[in-house]
Amino acid sequence: MRNHGTREGKHGPATQAVHAGQPEPRPGAPVVAPIVRSSTFHWAGPEDGIDLLYSRYGNNPNQESVAARVAALEGTDDALALASGMAAISMTLLAAAGQGDHIVASRHLYGATWALLSKEFPRRGITTTFVDPGDPGAWDQAVTPDTRVVLVELPTNPALRVFDIEPACRAARGVGAILAADVTFATPMNIRAAEHGVDAVIHSATKYLGGHSDLIAGVVAGSRGLIRRVAKMMKLYGGSIDPQTAWLLERGIRTLPARMERHNRSALALAEWFTGVPGVRRVIHPGLPDHPDHVLATRMLNGYGGMVSIVLDGGGAAADRFSAALRLAAPAPSLGGVETLVSQPRHTSHVDLSPSERDELGIPDGFVRISVGLEDVADLKADFSRAVAAATRPAAAVTA
């Protein structure tokens, strides 16, 4: 028997991260549950007294255990682990919306999510209205009786904006839609989105939940009814998580509270340091007082996150030189690992947007996204100092 909570009732998030979802202990049982690689399980019929177990259905013991742990951390009735973050968000949206339905979404979204809504879903008869989440009235104006989902991202990728959830929540409730939120950057350590009215809490678990850049996964947490609907879509589209990946994800979640505490602290320290570095035109981090959403982020979040974005003088060419000069931080298109990762959204997550579209989202050429890892901050400062120096050097001097 697996529980979404710990064995002794409600505990704090660090305790939940370590213990939630584990079976009741018995003498001789392993402290760490084994990987159950079986694709199928003995079942003659309903008279056996158990549900049909089949790993494509997402109810393999490893899949169920990690889902229960996520539900406990998010404070929701249920959760589901899937094969990727995009599987999590696409199956959630397809569970809630079909042909003739409407979605209202923030303009500030991960690039692949934007492409899903703007290019793929119209082929399925699902339309989307994109709104400025900084305009509280925009949500109410955009929803219609056909709206089935209102979608937000918090903090946004990669501009690190933190918009108020309440207007989106109010608009969703007004038309009977679900409120879905991608909170990959925040994790349940920095915000429990369900407590803010979010019905479908979505993460790319590839990032902070896994935490070691060694798996691809996604999760969605919410009510039992919603999760059953998402699981139905997952069965049809084949988006279940592999048992070994589920085991790795659960292992990563055990250390999530400790990792996020350090990610939060180190990212803020680096953001403050970058503000005094010549050649850095702009530093973006919700913990900085000059961030446009600093007051709201301080109120809503339990930590400002492990992400820092900078805009370099010299545009894209400078950003290319910056990335090439790194020796400790790794230029790589992901985030949330124990190692510091650096990427340019114009080459990766937002490559499908035009320069003007990226500019409107606050992502000009020269924009660099930094996922701050667990290294010593002094070593990261030395690496970034060298990279900024290379970025600000004239191109001729670099090639000479």
Image (cartoon, rainbow, N blue to C red):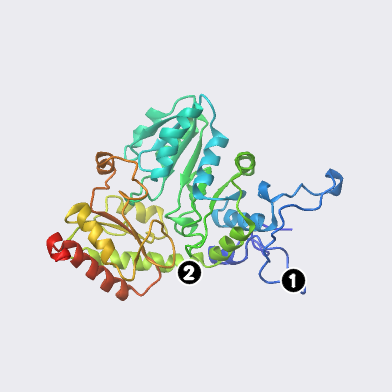
Residue drawn 38% across the image and 61% down it:
306
Q: Which residue is mark 1?
A: 29
Residue 63 screen position, x and y as percent: 64, 55
Asked if 170 appears above or below 48 in the picture, the reply is above
Residue drawn 17% across the image and 64% down it:
399
Asked if 335 appears above or below 201 in the picture, the reply is below
Residue drawn 56% across the image and 50% down it:
83
Asked if 166 appears above or below 141 in the picture, the reply is below
Left or right of 257, for residue 267: left
Q: Are marks 1 and 2 in contact (CB under 8 Å)?
A: no
Q: Nearer the viewer, residue 78 or 391?
A: 391
Q: Which element type, helix, strand or loop, lies under badge 1?
A: loop
Q: Which residue is mark 2?
A: 258
N-terminal of the pair, mark 1 or mark 2, is 1
Determine which quarter of the picture holds residue 224: top right
- At label 1, counting other C-alpha atoms closer than 10 Å, the crowd grade (few under 14, some 14-19, many 20 or more) is few
